[in-house]
Amino acid sequence: MDHPLIQNYPLPNHMQSILQACSSANLASLQTLLKPYNYPPTGTSPTWCESDTSPPETWKMVTVAITHGHIHILAYLLTLYSRGGGGIECDPVIEAILNNPDVQVMTLVHNHSPRSIYYTFNSGETLLSTACRRCQYRSQSDPFMSKMLPLIHYLLDNGVSPAKHVHDRFRGDSALLPAVQSSLPIDVIEKMIRCGAVVGVEEFGEAVGGKRIDVLGLFMEKGVFGGISYTELCDVARERANGDVNGEIGRFVKRGVRRRMWRDRRDLCLSRLCLFRSI
Protein backbone atom coordinates (compact mmCIF):
# COMPACT_ATOMS: atom_id res chain seq x y z
CA MET A 1 0.00 0.00 0.00
CA ASP A 2 1.27 3.48 -0.85
CA HIS A 3 2.62 5.75 1.88
CA PRO A 4 0.38 8.78 2.73
CA LEU A 5 3.10 11.04 1.31
CA ILE A 6 2.39 9.41 -2.05
CA GLN A 7 -1.40 9.08 -1.69
CA ASN A 8 -2.38 12.40 -0.16
CA TYR A 9 -0.18 15.01 -1.80
CA PRO A 10 -0.44 16.19 -5.42
CA LEU A 11 3.26 15.83 -6.21
CA PRO A 12 4.59 16.08 -9.76
CA ASN A 13 4.97 12.74 -11.57
CA HIS A 14 8.75 12.54 -11.20
CA MET A 15 8.48 13.00 -7.41
CA GLN A 16 5.77 10.35 -7.24
CA SER A 17 8.02 7.99 -9.18
CA ILE A 18 10.94 8.57 -6.80
CA LEU A 19 8.79 7.96 -3.71
CA GLN A 20 7.28 4.88 -5.37
CA ALA A 21 10.81 3.53 -5.90
CA CYS A 22 11.47 4.03 -2.16
CA SER A 23 8.25 2.28 -1.14
CA SER A 24 8.77 -0.64 -3.55
CA ALA A 25 12.43 -1.17 -2.50
CA ASN A 26 13.62 -0.67 -6.08
CA LEU A 27 17.12 0.67 -5.45
CA ALA A 28 18.24 0.52 -9.09
CA SER A 29 15.21 2.53 -10.18
CA LEU A 30 15.74 5.04 -7.38
CA GLN A 31 19.39 5.57 -8.32
CA THR A 32 18.42 6.00 -11.97
CA LEU A 33 15.70 8.52 -11.14
CA LEU A 34 18.06 10.53 -8.91
CA LYS A 35 20.99 10.47 -11.33
CA PRO A 36 19.97 13.61 -13.29
CA TYR A 37 20.12 15.65 -10.07
CA ASN A 38 23.88 15.12 -9.68
CA TYR A 39 23.73 13.60 -6.21
CA PRO A 40 27.15 13.03 -4.70
CA PRO A 41 27.49 9.61 -3.02
CA THR A 42 28.74 11.38 0.12
CA GLY A 43 29.34 14.94 1.23
CA THR A 44 27.21 17.87 2.26
CA SER A 45 23.47 17.49 2.04
CA PRO A 46 21.76 19.65 -0.57
CA THR A 47 18.97 21.93 0.57
CA TRP A 48 15.95 21.78 -1.71
CA CYS A 49 13.02 24.02 -2.30
CA GLU A 50 10.68 21.62 -4.03
CA SER A 51 9.67 22.62 -7.51
CA ASP A 52 8.38 20.97 -10.65
CA THR A 53 11.93 20.05 -11.60
CA SER A 54 13.47 19.08 -8.23
CA PRO A 55 13.36 15.72 -6.44
CA PRO A 56 11.32 15.34 -3.23
CA GLU A 57 13.07 16.41 -0.05
CA THR A 58 15.24 13.63 1.33
CA TRP A 59 13.32 13.37 4.61
CA LYS A 60 10.26 12.33 2.62
CA MET A 61 12.17 9.53 0.93
CA VAL A 62 13.67 8.46 4.26
CA THR A 63 10.22 8.43 5.90
CA VAL A 64 8.81 6.22 3.14
CA ALA A 65 11.77 3.81 3.35
CA ILE A 66 11.47 3.48 7.15
CA THR A 67 7.69 3.00 7.00
CA HIS A 68 8.08 0.11 4.57
CA GLY A 69 11.09 -1.35 6.38
CA HIS A 70 13.46 -1.15 3.41
CA ILE A 71 16.87 -1.14 5.09
CA HIS A 72 18.94 -1.01 1.90
CA ILE A 73 16.95 1.98 0.57
CA LEU A 74 17.40 3.79 3.89
CA ALA A 75 21.15 3.04 3.91
CA TYR A 76 21.48 4.51 0.42
CA LEU A 77 19.40 7.60 1.22
CA LEU A 78 21.49 8.35 4.30
CA THR A 79 24.52 8.72 2.05
CA LEU A 80 22.78 11.76 0.56
CA TYR A 81 22.95 13.54 3.92
CA SER A 82 26.15 14.87 5.42
CA ARG A 83 27.07 12.63 8.34
CA GLY A 84 25.90 14.12 11.62
CA GLY A 85 23.71 16.60 9.75
CA GLY A 86 20.49 17.76 11.34
CA GLY A 87 18.17 17.17 8.37
CA ILE A 88 17.45 13.59 9.40
CA GLU A 89 16.25 14.74 12.82
CA CYS A 90 12.68 15.87 12.16
CA ASP A 91 9.25 14.87 13.43
CA PRO A 92 8.16 12.78 10.39
CA VAL A 93 11.32 10.63 10.43
CA ILE A 94 11.18 10.05 14.20
CA GLU A 95 7.43 9.31 14.00
CA ALA A 96 8.14 6.75 11.28
CA ILE A 97 10.66 5.06 13.59
CA LEU A 98 8.12 5.02 16.43
CA ASN A 99 5.33 3.67 14.24
CA ASN A 100 7.59 1.02 12.71
CA PRO A 101 10.10 0.16 15.46
CA ASP A 102 13.18 -1.65 14.22
CA VAL A 103 16.56 -1.71 15.95
CA GLN A 104 18.38 -2.07 12.64
CA VAL A 105 16.70 1.09 11.33
CA MET A 106 17.46 2.95 14.56
CA THR A 107 21.08 1.82 14.42
CA LEU A 108 21.48 3.13 10.87
CA VAL A 109 19.94 6.49 11.74
CA HIS A 110 21.89 6.72 15.01
CA ASN A 111 25.22 5.89 13.35
CA HIS A 112 24.55 8.56 10.75
CA SER A 113 23.19 11.17 13.18
CA PRO A 114 24.26 10.50 16.80
CA ARG A 115 21.88 13.15 18.16
CA SER A 116 18.84 11.35 16.78
CA ILE A 117 18.41 9.10 19.83
CA TYR A 118 18.03 12.19 22.03
CA TYR A 119 15.29 13.67 19.87
CA THR A 120 12.73 15.82 21.71
CA PHE A 121 9.37 16.86 20.29
CA ASN A 122 8.01 20.37 20.82
CA SER A 123 5.70 18.96 23.50
CA GLY A 124 8.73 18.05 25.61
CA GLU A 125 8.30 14.32 25.01
CA THR A 126 11.48 12.52 24.03
CA LEU A 127 11.94 9.65 21.62
CA LEU A 128 12.39 7.35 24.63
CA SER A 129 9.35 8.54 26.61
CA THR A 130 7.17 8.44 23.48
CA ALA A 131 8.35 4.92 22.70
CA CYS A 132 7.28 3.84 26.21
CA ARG A 133 3.93 5.60 25.85
CA ARG A 134 3.23 3.86 22.54
CA CYS A 135 3.24 0.55 24.45
CA GLN A 136 0.26 1.54 26.61
CA TYR A 137 -2.83 -0.67 26.35
CA ARG A 138 -0.88 -3.34 24.48
CA SER A 139 -0.40 -6.89 25.73
CA GLN A 140 3.07 -8.38 26.02
CA SER A 141 2.11 -10.84 23.26
CA ASP A 142 1.38 -8.01 20.81
CA PRO A 143 3.84 -8.29 17.85
CA PHE A 144 4.39 -4.52 18.13
CA MET A 145 5.87 -5.04 21.61
CA SER A 146 8.42 -7.55 20.32
CA LYS A 147 9.79 -4.74 18.14
CA MET A 148 9.36 -1.73 20.44
CA LEU A 149 10.97 -3.26 23.54
CA PRO A 150 14.32 -3.90 21.79
CA LEU A 151 14.20 -0.29 20.55
CA ILE A 152 13.70 0.97 24.11
CA HIS A 153 16.62 -1.17 25.31
CA TYR A 154 18.74 0.17 22.45
CA LEU A 155 18.07 3.78 23.47
CA LEU A 156 18.91 3.10 27.13
CA ASP A 157 22.01 1.06 26.25
CA ASN A 158 23.30 3.94 24.13
CA GLY A 159 23.08 6.59 26.81
CA VAL A 160 19.60 8.09 26.56
CA SER A 161 18.59 9.30 30.02
CA PRO A 162 15.15 8.33 31.34
CA ALA A 163 15.24 11.21 33.85
CA LYS A 164 13.08 14.33 33.71
CA HIS A 165 14.40 17.09 31.49
CA VAL A 166 13.73 20.65 30.42
CA HIS A 167 13.20 21.38 26.72
CA ASP A 168 12.82 25.05 25.77
CA ARG A 169 9.96 26.23 28.01
CA PHE A 170 8.56 22.75 28.59
CA ARG A 171 9.45 20.32 31.34
CA GLY A 172 9.17 16.78 30.07
CA ASP A 173 8.17 13.80 32.17
CA SER A 174 10.69 11.10 32.85
CA ALA A 175 10.47 8.02 30.66
CA LEU A 176 9.94 6.01 33.84
CA LEU A 177 6.34 7.27 34.23
CA PRO A 178 5.05 6.06 30.82
CA ALA A 179 7.10 2.87 31.26
CA VAL A 180 5.20 2.04 34.47
CA GLN A 181 1.88 3.21 32.99
CA SER A 182 2.44 0.92 30.02
CA SER A 183 3.24 -2.07 32.28
CA LEU A 184 6.63 -2.59 30.64
CA PRO A 185 8.63 -5.63 31.81
CA ILE A 186 10.66 -5.38 35.00
CA ASP A 187 13.99 -5.57 33.12
CA VAL A 188 13.14 -2.29 31.33
CA ILE A 189 12.17 -0.58 34.60
CA GLU A 190 15.33 -1.84 36.31
CA LYS A 191 17.52 -0.59 33.47
CA MET A 192 15.89 2.84 33.76
CA ILE A 193 16.68 2.93 37.47
CA ARG A 194 20.31 2.04 36.70
CA CYS A 195 20.37 4.79 34.07
CA GLY A 196 19.35 7.49 36.54
CA ALA A 197 15.54 7.54 36.59
CA VAL A 198 14.18 9.06 39.81
CA VAL A 199 11.05 7.66 41.44
CA GLY A 200 8.47 10.33 42.25
CA VAL A 201 4.91 10.34 43.55
CA GLU A 202 3.41 9.64 40.11
CA GLU A 203 5.73 6.75 39.26
CA PHE A 204 5.23 5.13 42.66
CA GLY A 205 1.47 5.71 42.55
CA GLU A 206 1.18 4.14 39.09
CA ALA A 207 3.03 1.04 40.31
CA VAL A 208 0.63 0.83 43.27
CA GLY A 209 -2.46 1.34 41.12
CA GLY A 210 -1.27 -1.26 38.63
CA LYS A 211 -0.54 -3.74 41.44
CA ARG A 212 3.03 -4.08 40.18
CA ILE A 213 4.53 -5.78 43.22
CA ASP A 214 7.69 -6.51 41.22
CA VAL A 215 8.14 -2.82 40.37
CA LEU A 216 7.37 -1.70 43.94
CA GLY A 217 9.95 -4.16 45.24
CA LEU A 218 12.50 -2.77 42.76
CA PHE A 219 11.72 0.81 43.80
CA MET A 220 12.10 -0.03 47.49
CA GLU A 221 15.33 -1.94 46.92
CA LYS A 222 17.17 0.17 44.34
CA GLY A 223 15.13 3.28 43.58
CA VAL A 224 16.24 6.86 44.17
CA PHE A 225 13.25 8.82 45.43
CA GLY A 226 12.67 12.45 44.53
CA GLY A 227 10.15 14.81 46.11
CA ILE A 228 8.70 12.18 48.42
CA SER A 229 9.71 10.84 51.84
CA TYR A 230 9.63 7.20 52.83
CA THR A 231 6.72 7.77 55.20
CA GLU A 232 4.73 9.45 52.39
CA LEU A 233 5.09 6.29 50.33
CA CYS A 234 2.70 4.54 52.71
CA ASP A 235 0.16 7.34 52.19
CA VAL A 236 0.46 6.98 48.42
CA ALA A 237 -0.02 3.22 48.73
CA ARG A 238 -3.15 3.72 50.81
CA GLU A 239 -4.62 6.31 48.41
CA ARG A 240 -3.81 4.59 45.12
CA ALA A 241 -4.30 0.91 45.99
CA ASN A 242 -7.75 0.61 44.43
CA GLY A 243 -9.21 -2.83 44.89
CA ASP A 244 -6.55 -3.89 47.39
CA VAL A 245 -9.23 -5.50 49.53
CA ASN A 246 -6.84 -7.56 51.64
CA GLY A 247 -4.37 -4.72 52.11
CA GLU A 248 -1.57 -6.78 50.52
CA ILE A 249 -0.01 -3.84 48.69
CA GLY A 250 -0.19 -1.56 51.72
CA ARG A 251 1.55 -4.15 53.91
CA PHE A 252 4.15 -4.81 51.22
CA VAL A 253 5.00 -1.10 51.00
CA LYS A 254 5.19 -0.75 54.81
CA ARG A 255 7.61 -3.66 55.04
CA GLY A 256 9.66 -2.20 52.21
CA VAL A 257 9.77 1.22 53.87
CA ARG A 258 10.95 -0.29 57.15
CA ARG A 259 13.70 -2.26 55.40
CA ARG A 260 14.80 0.74 53.35
CA MET A 261 14.91 3.07 56.37
CA TRP A 262 16.90 0.49 58.34
CA ARG A 263 19.32 0.02 55.45
CA ASP A 264 19.81 3.76 55.00
CA ARG A 265 20.50 4.22 58.73
CA ARG A 266 22.98 1.34 58.63
CA ASP A 267 24.75 2.79 55.59
CA LEU A 268 24.92 6.21 57.24
CA CYS A 269 26.43 4.74 60.42
CA LEU A 270 29.00 2.77 58.40
CA SER A 271 30.00 5.86 56.39
CA ARG A 272 30.40 7.87 59.59
CA LEU A 273 32.48 5.07 61.11
CA CYS A 274 34.74 4.98 58.05
CA LEU A 275 35.12 8.77 58.21
CA PHE A 276 35.97 8.60 61.92
CA ARG A 277 38.61 5.92 61.34
CA SER A 278 40.23 7.94 58.56
CA ILE A 279 40.76 10.98 60.82
Image: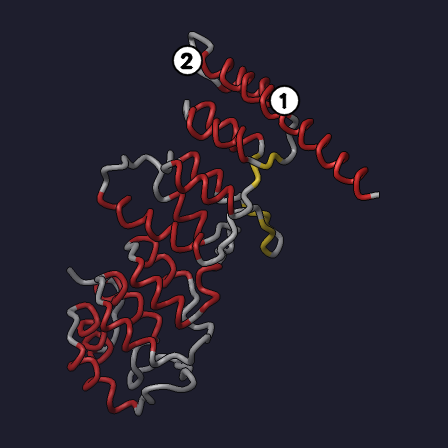
Tell me the kind of residue under disc 1: Glu
Residue name at image x 55 percent, y 46 percent: 196
Relative image position of residue 116 (x, y in whole percent): 44, 64
Decide if residue 275 is on the left or right side of residue 26: right
Image quadrant in which the N terminus is located? bottom left
Tell me the kind of residue under disc 2: Gly
Decide if residue 170 is on the left or right side of residue 106: right
User: Are the residues flagged by discs 2 and 1 in contact, CB closer than 8 Å?
Assistant: no
- The residue to which callout 2 is attached is 243
Spatial separation of the CA atoms under disc 2 and disc 1: 20 Å
Relative image position of residue 179 (x, y in whole percent): 43, 39
Can you name the residue that lies furthest to the right here? 279
Image quadrant in which the C terminus is located? top right
The answer to whether 252 is drawn above or below residue 102 in the figure is: above
The mark found on residue 232 in the picture is 1
The answer to whether 8 is drawn above or below residue 98 in the figure is: below
User: What is the crowding at mark 2: few (fewer than 14 residues within 10 Å), some, or many (at least 20)?
Assistant: few
Q: Nearer the viewer, residue 226 or 16?
A: 226
- Label 1 element class: helix
Residue name at image x 58 percent, y 22 percent: 259
